[in-house]
């Protein structure tokens, strides 16, 4: 194309471009740290307002961009990750209106802004992000519509509603093609390049447990897992979703064991019934795949560590589905290696002297074979004296001592930690296990929801002959001593008890699960499963491509038909009249473009006397309906029907 | 090298497109003669979508993929809409009033289409000039300002009708070749000797400004001689009036190519063109003698003027080749 003078931007085009950029930026801001989001918003508002007056000189805006990028990097501590890249994009987008002067600038702003919803989805795939992102995309298209009209030199002022309707129509027309590509375009089974991780972790189960860090997670009522059972369902008190096993303790923080990666998986024998289920895990950015105690086999895409915790091959950055079977262990690693025994007994020196003294005292009382008795004695102590509360002070140096002898109140973090320290001091190998306990059944979809607030920590002790045995000291607390729970704190319990609220919430979650199932969790494996009913699953990728090509052709045909339909007249009488004209045109008696209806009728009548009477009557009625005052008195539908029926004799 | 390759490809495409297009007006565009290619912004948009799509597929990020595909679907729909803007459009006539060479020829392009579809903001291009075309109730007109350089037939060449609406992602265009040549009159010389009055057959009816053949009076205009002022009438009316004389019948002005030996070929044409205009302004009857042609006139009026100027415009060049 010929190079022409850059077209200056009109006011409407300017306003639409700014609105589109703002709408695209919004979902991204929601995902950023609050301070950064506020700063970016301020920059965006300032440049947007400035863009009405003048264009910022190139040098100054480059300098500003550098400074802002520096600020962003400093906010994240100069580390690189997915969220840092998204924050940088947000800041640059906020700065971009500074150079808004021509139609070309506006188009590049809109094109660039489309990356904002895209990067939002890399951070979060929830319904809010999706809604805001789609809104941004629609506004971006509307801005392009306005810019193209400005460029064509024939911008008819139109209302925003009008323009949005035009855009939505275009999106709707393109939707069949988009959806067929979505379901049928061959997916990549394993990524070509890895997903960069986030610098700022989201609250959730981690590989560590330090005092006070769990409260945030336990205040979070977002779903963590959704589980559908095929067949028998375990009773809620057996629903232990086993996550990271924490073996190392430094006096304050529990951590996963290092240097155990090469160890073979523990040997087990199983008992009881088998549970067959599908877990849908919300994105965690971590690798742990939560399974009921204990998974029978390792699902594809995951590995099993020595402590029988499943780890995905890649961090879970989107909703994933895992089909698994679990059975309770009859024996779990009955032969403990010397190295592991030593690690499971390790305690840092100089911590918790009172706990250690108590443990030694119990050991003397029960003798060398009294492991099971010591465990039972500890549980009795908790049952008799301890209470459950979330309002606990931060512990000092001797966390177990303070909990066991002074407060005698706490939540799972304190119970499991102190219990394991007590066991280790008594010479019983023990470890902290984190995960989720319990769940709530959703009646709408017959599945179970496990929320972040169900996060739990318990203990496993190693007993001769049985191996690792699960012990949950928190569950031993007597019901009358449960004081301060999440429900009390958030008022969620009270609110949820109102009639109608809980079913609404269940319905919402059920819809969300359907969305997860249908859209978010769709991947290469599920795509192949789509081919099975069609009988094309043997053909693999080629079958998929063939199916995609076929459906894309169908979709394109549908688009053509829909788009061309606009040409058809909306008036059925006029349409029928034109069809009638076409029938005579085939006989060489078509109506000339400027020939009045009655004149044409007379001409045809002269050439074909057999049609004359019927055609003239129809012509008169048509002319009467359209042009005569009071012509609306006759029934247009009847006339249309008769026009359609008329054939040249 | 790359440029010449592109030019050659362009020329090949033009020849191919020419063969496919109807030769004469009216021309009705259909999908066989409409071409659609992405604009520069469209290419950028496609790159944006490809980046998004590749990233979304790699991360198996379904919302991002859905967003990308919805945008792509809308883009494809916009291509169809762009094509349909032109499909069914008919250019049924082009016309222009002849103008002297060097001034701007206003070329009117008349278009029509079945009503029902909105066709606005189309762009008509011809000989490097462009004008918008919007159809109201199935008819529209674009007026192009074509520069003219020399007398004779102006071949407008190829008309391009294009649109980048609705989204500016793609340009749909089509060609029409108008076989209607447009006439450009010779440019009259800016100044020179006055009309050779009395050289024709009407020599015997000598004009006498002081005579009695007053036809009527008119207001004094700048440049009127003092001798023609009707003083008595002016005194009565309190404003300056001058006498106008009717050219006596048969007092024809003969404009003759052979009277101008001192001028070159084009110079003669330009002087004759000026004289034709002056004679027409003075409402004289005039005839035109040109080499190798029958004498035009005598006569007067717009049709006669057009015949004279047309003959002058189409006079072959000095070397005998058509100009």
Image (cartoon, rainbow, N blue to C red):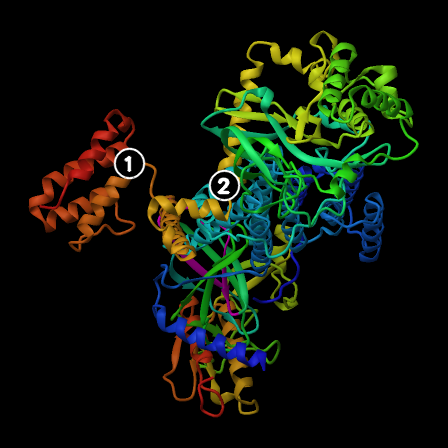
Q: Around disc 1, counting alpha carbons within 10 Å, would you say few (fewer than 14), some (14 to 19), or many (20 or more)?
A: some
Residue pictured at 16% horizontal, 38% vertical:
A645
Residue toward you, A513 or A121:
A513
Where in the figure is residue B244, as x and y percent of width and height? 54, 64
Up-down: is B34 above or below A240? Answer: below
Res. A435 visible in picture: yes
| Left or right of A506, for residue A99 | right
Chain letter for mark 1, please: A
Q: Could you say which quadrant of the image residue A129 lies in?
A: top right
Q: Position of residue A141 (x, y in %)?
A: 56, 45
* Residue A397 in the figure: left or right of residue B42: right
Say whether residue B125 is magenta: yes
Q: Position of residue A198 (x, y in %)?
A: 72, 44
Check the picture and name the quadrant holding the N terminus of chain A: bottom right
Q: Circle 2 sits in a helix, a strand or a loop, which is it?
A: helix
Side (left or right) of B227 relative to B124: right
**Can you identify the residue that label 2 sits on?**
A166
Q: Which residues are magenta?
A: B107-127
Give the labeled residue for mark 1: A572
Q: How many numbered marks, from 0 up?
A: 2
Q: Secondary structure at mark 1?
A: helix
Q: Are marks 1 and 2 in contact (CB under 8 Å)?
A: no
């Amino acid at each position: 194309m010929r190079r022409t003078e850059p077209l200056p931007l009109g006011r409407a085009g300017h306003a639409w471009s700014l609105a589109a950029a703002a709408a695209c930026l919004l979902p991204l801001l929601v995902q950023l740290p609050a301070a950064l989001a506020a700063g970016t918003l301020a920059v965006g508002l300032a440049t947007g307002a400035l863009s009405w007056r003048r264009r910022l000189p190139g040098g100054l805006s480059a300098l500003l961009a550098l400074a802002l990028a520096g600020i962003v990097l400093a906010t994240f501590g100069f580390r690189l990750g997915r969220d840092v890249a998204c924050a940088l994009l947000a800041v640059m987008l906020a700065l971009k209106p500074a150079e808004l002067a021509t139609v070309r600038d506006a188009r590049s702003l809109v094109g660039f802004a489309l990356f904002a919803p895209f990067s939002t989805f890399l951070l979060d795939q929830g319904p809010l992000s999706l809604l805001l992102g789609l809104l941004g995309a629609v506004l971006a298209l509307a801005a392009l519509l306005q810019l193209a009209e400005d460029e064509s030199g024939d911008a008819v002022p139109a209302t925003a509603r009008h323009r949005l309707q035009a855009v939505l129509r275009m999106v709707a027309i393109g939707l069949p093609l988009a959806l067929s590509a979505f379901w049928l375009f061959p997916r990549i089974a394993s990524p070509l390049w890895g997903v960069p991780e986030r610098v700022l972790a989201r609250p959730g189960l981690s590989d560590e447990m330090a005092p006070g860090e769990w409260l945030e997670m336990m205040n979070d009522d977002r779903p963590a897992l959704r589980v559908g059972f095929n067949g028998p369902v375990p009773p809620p008190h057996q629903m232990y979703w086993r996550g990271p096993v924490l073996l190392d303790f430094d006096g304050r923080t529990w951590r996963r064991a290092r240097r155990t990666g090469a160890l073979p998986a523990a040997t087990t024998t199983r008992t009881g019934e088998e549970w067959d289920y599908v877990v849908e895990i919300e994105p965690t950015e971590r690798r742990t795949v939560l399974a009921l105690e204990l998974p029978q086999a390792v699902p594809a895409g995951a590995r099993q560590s020595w402590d029988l915790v499943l780890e995905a091959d890649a961090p879970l950055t989107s909703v994933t589905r895992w089909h698994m079977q679990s059975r309770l262990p009859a024996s779990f690693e009955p032969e403990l290696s010397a190295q592991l025994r030593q690690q499971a007994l390790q305690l840092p020196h100089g911590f918790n002297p009172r706990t250690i003294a108590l443990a030694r005292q119990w050991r003397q009382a029960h003798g060398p074979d009294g492991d099971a008795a010591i465990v039972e004695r500890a549980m009795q102590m908790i049952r008799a004296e301890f209470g459950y509360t979330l309002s606990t002070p931060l512990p000092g140096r001797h966390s177990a001592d303070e909990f066991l002898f002074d407060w005698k109140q706490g939540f799972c973090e304190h119970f499991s930690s102190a219990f394991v320290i007590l066991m280790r001091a008594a010479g019983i190998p023990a470890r902290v296990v984190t995960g989720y306990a319990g769940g709530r059944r959703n009646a709408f979809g017959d599945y179970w929801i496990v929320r972040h607030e169900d996060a739990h920590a318990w203990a496993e002790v190693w007993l001769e002959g049985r191996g690792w045995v699960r012990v949950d000291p928190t569950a031993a607390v007597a019901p009358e001593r449960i004081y301060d729970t999440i429900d009390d704190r958030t008022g969620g319990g009270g609110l949820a008890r109102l009639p109608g609220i809980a079913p609404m919430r269940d319905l919402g979650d059920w819809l969300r699960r359907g969305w997860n199932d249908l859209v978010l969790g769709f991947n290469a494996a599920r795509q192949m499963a789509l081919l099975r009913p069609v009988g094309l699953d043997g053909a693999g990728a080629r079958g998929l491509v063939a199916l995609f090509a076929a459906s894309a052709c169908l979709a394109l045909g549908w688009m053509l038909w829909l788009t061309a339909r606009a040409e058809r007249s909306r008036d059925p009488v006029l349409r029928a009249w034109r069809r009638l004209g076409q029938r005579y045109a085939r006989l060489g008696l078509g109506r000339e473009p400027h020939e009045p209806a009655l004149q044409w009728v007379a001409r045809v009548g002269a050439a074909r006397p057999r049609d004359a009477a019927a055609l003239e009557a129809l012509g008169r009625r048509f002319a009467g309906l359209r042009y005569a005052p009071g012509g609306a008195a006759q029934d247009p539908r009847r006339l249309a029907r008769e026009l359609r029926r008329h054939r040249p004799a | 090298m790359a440029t010449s390759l592109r030019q050659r490809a362009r020329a090949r495409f033009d020849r191919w497109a020419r063969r496919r297009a109807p030769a004469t007006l009216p021309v009705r565009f259909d999908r066989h003669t409409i071409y659609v290619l992405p604009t520069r912004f469209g290419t950028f948009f496609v790159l944006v979508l490809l980046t998004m799509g590749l990233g979304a597929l790699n991360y198996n990020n379904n919302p991002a993929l859905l967003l990308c595909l919805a945008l792509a679907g809308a883009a494809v729909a916009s291509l169809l809409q762009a094509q349909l803007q032109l499909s069914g459009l008919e250019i049924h006539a082009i016309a222009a009033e002849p103008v002297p060479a060097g001034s701007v020829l206003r070329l009117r392009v008349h278009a029509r289409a079945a009503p029902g579809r909105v066709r606005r903001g189309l762009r008509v291009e011809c000989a490097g000039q462009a004008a918008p075309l919007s159809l109201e109730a199935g008819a529209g007109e674009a007026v192009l300002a074509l520069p003219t350089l020399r007398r004779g037939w102006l071949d407008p060449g190829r008309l391009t009708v294009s649109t980048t609406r609705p989204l500016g992602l793609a340009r749909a265009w089509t060609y029409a070749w108008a076989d209607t040549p447009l006439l450009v009159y010779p440019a009259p010389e800016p100044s020179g000797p006055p009309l050779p009055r009395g050289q024709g057959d009407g020599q015997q009816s000598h004009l006498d400004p002081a005579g009695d053949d007053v036809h009527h009076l008119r207001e004094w205009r700048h440049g009127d001689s003092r001798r023609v002022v009707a003083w008595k009438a002016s005194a009565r009316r309190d404003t300056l009036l001058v006498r106008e004389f009717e050219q006596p019948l048969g007092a024809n002005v003969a404009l003759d190519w052979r009277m101008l030996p001192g001028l070159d070929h084009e110079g003669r044409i330009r002087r004759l063109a000026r004289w034709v205009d002056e004679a027409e302004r003075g409402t004289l009857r005039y005839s035109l003698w040109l080499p190798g042609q029958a004498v035009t006139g005598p006569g007067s009026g717009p049709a006669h003027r057009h015949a004279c100027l047309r003959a002058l415009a189409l006079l072959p060049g000095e070397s005998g080749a058509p100009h």
